[in-house]
Structures are given as structure tokens and as C-alpha cells.
Amino acid sequence: MLYDLELKSVGKTYPDGTVAVSDFDLKVEKGEFVAFLGPSGCGKSTTLRMIAGFEEITNGEIFIMGQNISHTPPEKRPTSMIFQNYALFPHMTVRQNIAFGLDIKGVPKSEKDRKVDRILDMFDLTEFADRKADKLSGGQRQRIALARGLVVEPEILLLDEPLGALDANLRRIIQNELKLLQRDLGITFVFVTHAQSEALGLSDRVVVMSNGVVEQISAPKELYTRPATPFVAEFIGSNTIIEGKPAQGGDQGLRLIETPYGPISGVGAAGANLAVIPAEAFNLGLRNTPGEIRLEGTVTAKQLVGSIGYLRVKLSDGREIDAETHVGALEAHSYSPGSPVTLGIDPTSVTLIHN
Ligand SMILES: Nc1ncnc2c1ncn2[C@@H]1O[C@H](COP(=O)(O)OP(=O)(O)OP(=O)(O)O)[C@@H](O)[C@H]1O
């Protein structure tokens, strides 16, 4: 299969010895929307810059449409990059900013004008075409940056926290636009963000990184329901992680670990010793389903937010965990602080991983 983008064991060690990225493997299909997600300093931007060609790779190889472009200069790669601060030329007009990439490529004037006019129209920027870029709002600048990236018709659009400078409202609007645009154009998007909701809401697959290493590459839902590593289990969503020892047993393809709270079964690999329980997997009370896991505790806090109810529960050893449930389930009982509570968990919603 020919991938639009393929990273094979890509690594970057900066001249000062900082290992920013190690052994990054990734295969992206044409038209996919992939997000790099992770805490500050985990190597997201470095990886994006290596794909764009702004940063030399020190290990591995990068392919675009099967061509090894590892050492191809940026302007010769079929990529465009959009930066967080948009990097517009403030004293150039909107039209000049958008035409910039075409000028560099030496596109003839008539073709250039046609392409710029078309994209100005697509982004509703025609009326601002002759205004200087520094006389525009944040949302308009964001659109110009996108238009400038897309006018050169890249195979892959690389976006480095492109919505970071926008306020929350505008950010949501542009997130929507971005997703629609990507679907319409069918261009591959690789997007860097440290905002979880953005990565999970926009992308087909998310690459979770920590300390220069890929932790997991999965569809958003799978990151939530089947974290593969302790880092992902801590970083994504709200999980309770319980340590135990691998044990014999576990029905219907499930595995079992012995924990201080009793046996816990779940979905996972042999030898796994951590049970990851999503906050929304806790049921208030038992449902007496096969293999149901039971945790006894005392309510320490309750909060209702819209249709979601949050319960903080102290287990027998003093550890506090968070359970999330539909508000109706919480309202049916008083659950005031100090009330005893039994939490039931369906083992198929538990993931067992190695620490
Ligand atoms: N030019 C450089 N020289 C040395 N080290 C660098 C250089 N640029 C980045 N680093 C280091 O490489 C690591 C990865 O940085 P990078 O900017 O890729 O992370 P990031 O995940 O994009 O972070 P952020 O979300 O804060 O932008 C960090 O430890 C950073 O300090």
C-alpha cells in the first residue's frame, strides 16, 4: 500500500545533545486527519518540522507518496505548514500574503491570479484582498494563513497549533470549518496540539507522544476506551488505575489480575498488571452481570454538571477515585458525603496493561 506519509524510525537529536524524538513510526493514508498530542516539550513540533523539512532528521527516513524526501529541501516537498502565530507578512496585503508561496514557485501571473482569486472566494476573504494583513482580526488572519497554505495545493498540510492564538469561541468555530474544509479537499492534515479535546474532536487518529516517544496511535474513541500505556491512561480522559498481579482465570477471553481490592478482570495482554477503569465505566450499585467487579467505598463529594454527575469515592484503604454517571442515576439516591456506595464495573470496559 502506498501511504501519503510514512515515517520510519525517525529521530532527532539536537546539536546540544537533546534527544527530542526517537524511533517515530507512522503511516498516514491519503485524506487522513492525524493529530500529534502530548505535553509541552514531548517533540510534537520537532516532528512536524522534520516532515516539513525545516529541521534535519538525525535518524530514520521520511516518505511522501512513496518518495524518500528525508533530505529534500522544504520548498521542494509537497507540504505546506501553518504556524501558531500565522507568520503573515504584516505590511503585505492579504492577496500578496496568499500569493507568496506561488511566487516562490515561479507560477506564471495569470495562473497565480486565478488560484488566489479562487481561494480568496473560498475563504470569504475577497473583500479584504487589498487590505494589509496587520489590519485584520485574529479569525481573519487565521483564514489567510490557511488560504496561503492551501493555495499551493499541497499533498499534506502541516498545522502547528494553528488555533492556539484564538479565543475559545472563535476556536470552536474555526475547528468546525477546518474539519469541513479537510473533508471537502481530501488533503492529508497533520495537526499538532496540546489540547486534548481538539485532538480527539477533529482527527481520525491521534498520535500520543511523551518525552520524544510515541506512546499510542489510535482513533480517538480507542484512546479513551483502550489506552495502551500507563502514560495514555493518565493523560487521556479520567481513569482509575489499579495495580495488581497477573493471575489465572478470566472468562470469555478476559484476563485477570489480583489487586488489593479483589480480583479484577478485563481486556488485555498476557502478563499485564494494571487495571485501567474509565470514570464512566463505574455503575452505581451492582447489575449482577457475569464477572462484574465490585468496589466498596464512601462518598466524599458529589457534583452535578449539566447531564453528568460526578462522584468522588473513598475506597477502604483511603484512596479516592472519580466516578462519572448520568445525573439521573445520582439523583435517584441521596449519596451525601459519608454515604456508603457500591460501584459495579463491567469487566469488558476494563483494560489491563503493563506498567
Ligand atoms: N533548537 C533546539 N535545540 C535544542 N533543543 C531543542 C531545540 N528545539 C527544541 N528543543 C527541545 O526538544 C524537545 C522537544 O521540543 P518540541 O518543541 O518539539 O516539543 P513540543 O512537544 O512541540 O512542545 P510545545 O507544545 O511546548 O511546543 C524539548 O525538550 C525542547 O526543549
Image (cartoon, rainbow, N blue to C red):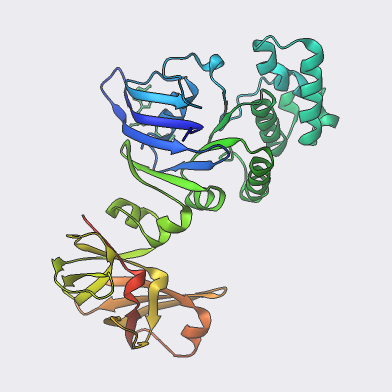
Q: Percent position (x, y) of residue 37?
A: 43, 44
Residue 238 higher or lower than 125, as above or below:
below
- Furthest residue in direction bottom, as rendered: 333
**Residue in view at x 50 percent, y 87 percent:** 331
Q: Percent position (x, y) of residue 189?
A: 56, 37
- Furthest residue in direction front, as rendered: 1
Q: Is residue 54 visible?
A: yes
Q: Quadrant of the C terminus?
A: bottom left
**Residue in view at x 67 percent, y 46 percent:** 180
Residue 176 higher or lower than 8, as above or below:
below
**Residue in view at x 29 percent, y 72 percent:** 320
Residue 40 higher or lower than 145, as above or below:
below
Residue 276 higher or lower than 105, as above or below:
below
Q: Percent position (x, y) of residue 60?
A: 33, 24
Q: Percent position (x, y) of residue 203?
A: 53, 47
| Ligand 1: quadrant of the figure | top left
Q: Is residue 237 visible?
A: no
